[in-house]
Amino acid sequence: MKTRIFIAIVGSLILFSVSPNSCLAEVKATQKILKIAIQKGNASDEACVRFRTSATTCFDGSYDAYKMFSSVDSMPQLYTLTNCKEQLSINSFGDFTSDKRVTVGLRVGRAGNHTIIVSMLSNFAGAEFVYLIDKTTGEMIDLKSTDMSYDFYAPVKGVDTSRFELLFTAASRTVTETEEQINTSKKELICYNESGTLVINNLSTEGITNLQLTDLSGKVLLFKTTENSEDITIKLPYTLKGMYVLQISNNQSTMVKKLMF
């Protein structure tokens, strides 16, 4: 097995990490790989997320590589976090059978316009979807579409691990009418579409709550994170007509409701 050495020079210090796998090493026909890059002008930086059966959710010395940051202040840099909050340039997870969310970290050298580009998306089946979620704007970008890039404005320089998230999802998940009540109040949860705005009343959850709207094929149309909210309004990305599925979840339970628009 080949060993790759990743080196970064910071001032008079030389930092390195060793990984026996590059992102593309030993790629099997069924191995799922996503490579994304951040770009500003001629400067760019790349990270890789992949799925391997024997990988774990934290750093794996056999599969992953730590992020080595550039000392060039103007260089935009991108990485992802493990479940243990480790910063990686190559991040491997076990096979996913349900939704998998991966935090994307940015280190922006200069405020201004940037672009996130997909340079490789391999072996994700037709019924599997990959999204980039911008929590600042509320946009959800389908990375399997023909235009695999996203332009955004970074208002300040520095590190940001709260804005972007990758969502890997299998559309074959089962949708049921079973409701495990996550609203702490005894009021009935009310959801409806009012002039292109999704209105949710009587949510009344404690802590962080994720709201996800999908069509019946499982394609994610909207994702939003809220905290300690009872009444929420969300502008829908475009006109929706027909049956849709709203999934509301926190760290304790999940509720699924079918909505007709």
Image (tube, rainbow, N blue to C red):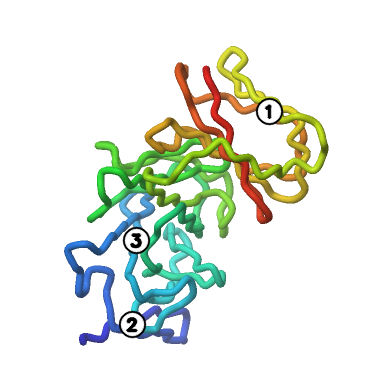
* Amino acid at pointer 2: Ser
Q: Nearer the viewer, residue 120 or 38?
A: 120
Q: Nearer the viewer, residue 238 or 203?
A: 203
- Depth check: 84 or 154 in front? 84
Kind of element beneath mark 1: strand
Q: Position of residue 89 (x, y in %)?
A: 39, 68
Label ID, residue 126:
none
Say which amino acid is labelled 3. Glu
Q: Earlier in the sequence, mark 1 or mark 2?
A: 2
Q: Position of residue 223 (x, y in %)?
A: 53, 39
Q: Which mark is residue 200?
A: 1
Asked if one can make out residue 106 in the rendered structure from this viewpoint, the answer is no
Spatial CA distance of label 3 from label 2 is 16 Å
Q: Residues within 10 Å of mark 2 (few under 14, many from 20)?
A: some
- Residue 165 percent coordinates (x, y): 49, 51
Give coordinates of residue 210: x percent, y percent. 61, 44
* Extreme-top residue of the structure: 195
Mark 3 residue crowding within 10 angstroms, few (<14) / some (14–19) / many (20+) = some
The answer to which image quadrant residue 91 occupies is bottom left
Q: Residue at x 25, y 37 (%)?
A: 146
Q: Residue at x 77, y 35 (%)?
A: 230
Q: CA distance from mark 1 to mark 2?
A: 47 Å
Q: Which quadrant does the N terminus fall into?
A: bottom left
Q: CA distance from mark 1 to mark 3?
A: 38 Å
Q: Secondary structure at mark 2?
A: strand
Residue topped by disc 3: 46
Residue at point 28%, 60% (across, down)? 32
Name the residue beneath numbered marker 2.
Answer: 19
Between discs 3 and 2, the one toward the N terminus: 2
**For residue 93, side relative to residue 159 (left or right):** left
